[in-house]
Each structure stands twice: as C-alpha cells, then as structure tokens.
Amino acid sequence: MAQARSARAPRHAPGSRPRSRPRVLPGGARGIRWDRVSRVALLIVLVGIFALYIGPARSYWSTVREAKHRRAEVAQLRRENARLRAKRSALRSTSSLEREARRLGMVRPSERAYVVKHLPKGP
C-alpha cells in the first residue's frame, strides 16, 4: 500500500500548486489570460468611479471657499453696521446736529451771519 500511495503522490512539493501551462491555440496563439483581463477590468472600473467623484469633490471645495469668503464679508458688514449705528446715535444729539449745521454754513434765525474774505490760508 505504501507503494500505491507514493505512486499517486504528486510530483510537486507539498503546499505549492503546479503551474499550468498556457493553452496554445492552433497557429501558435496563446489562450486568454483571464487573471490579467480581470485586473485590467477592475482597474478601469476603479478609475471610472474615481472620475465620478472628481466633479462633486471640486464643487464641495469651491462651496467651502465661497462660504469662507461670505463669512468674512458678513463680519466686515457687521463691523460697518455697528460703526454706522454709533454715528447715527451720536448725530441724534442736539449739539452734534448744531455742529453739522454750522459746518454747512447755517445760522439760527436770531443770529447774523458774517463772511470774512481774503483770509490767509492755514499751514
């Protein structure tokens, strides 16, 4: 029996598979290497999936950049709004109203206006 088992024993080392010879077709052509075809097909599919993600990713990043610019613009407008509100509250007082009116050349009805000409210009 030991001889029968050894006769049936494979010629290759245990744990390794025998290499199959590529099939040769008539005319000397070799058969289709399906392992390579499947690798190429998988690579094409992965590249296609990657290409489908490029557009949305670019759109996402441009939206993020635009949102950052808009937040900066809103912050600048809030500062300007606070400055204008402070100026409005300052102009509501009677002293500032009178000061602005005099700067524009206005006088009160009981006052007499004088215009001084040919003054030397300041430094």
Image (spheres, rainbow, N blue to C red):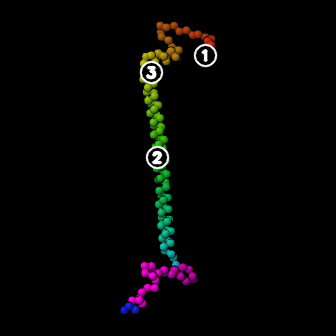
SS of the residue at dot 1?
A: loop
Spatial CA distance of label 3 from label 1 is: 28 Å
Numbered range of the magenta stretch: 5-30
Whether residue 9 is in magenta: the answer is: yes
Residue at 47%, 31% (x, y): give it.
Answer: 80
Instruction: Judge depth for marks 2 and 1 and give the one in front.
Output: 1
Quadrant of image for the N terminus? bottom left
Residue carrying label 1:
122
Category of crowding for the residue at label 3, using alpha-carbon neighbours closer than 10 angstroms: few (below 14), some (14–19), many (at least 20) = some
Q: Are marks 3 and 2 in contact (CB under 8 Å)?
A: no
Left or right: 28 as drawn, with respect to 71 = right
Quarter residue 5 falls in: bottom left
Left or right: 3 as drawn, with respect to 62 = left
Whether residue 116 is in magenta: the answer is: no
In this rendering, the answer to whether 87 lies above or below 72 is above
**Label 2 amino acid?**
Val
Residue carrying label 3:
91
Question: Who comes first in sequence, dot 3 or dot 1?
Answer: 3
**Label 1 amino acid?**
Gly
Quadrant of image for the C terminus? top right
The spot of residue 84 in percent (x, y) is: 45, 27
**Label 3 amino acid?**
Leu
The spot of residue 89 in percent (x, y) is: 42, 23
SS of the residue at dot 3?
A: helix
Comparing 9 with 77, the one in front is 9
Residue carrying label 2:
64
Spatial CA distance of label 2 from label 1 is: 54 Å
In this rendering, the answer to whether 64 lies above or below 77 is below
Question: Who comes first in sequence, dot 2 or dot 1?
Answer: 2
Majority secondary structure of magenta residues = loop
Comparing 120 with 66, the one in front is 120
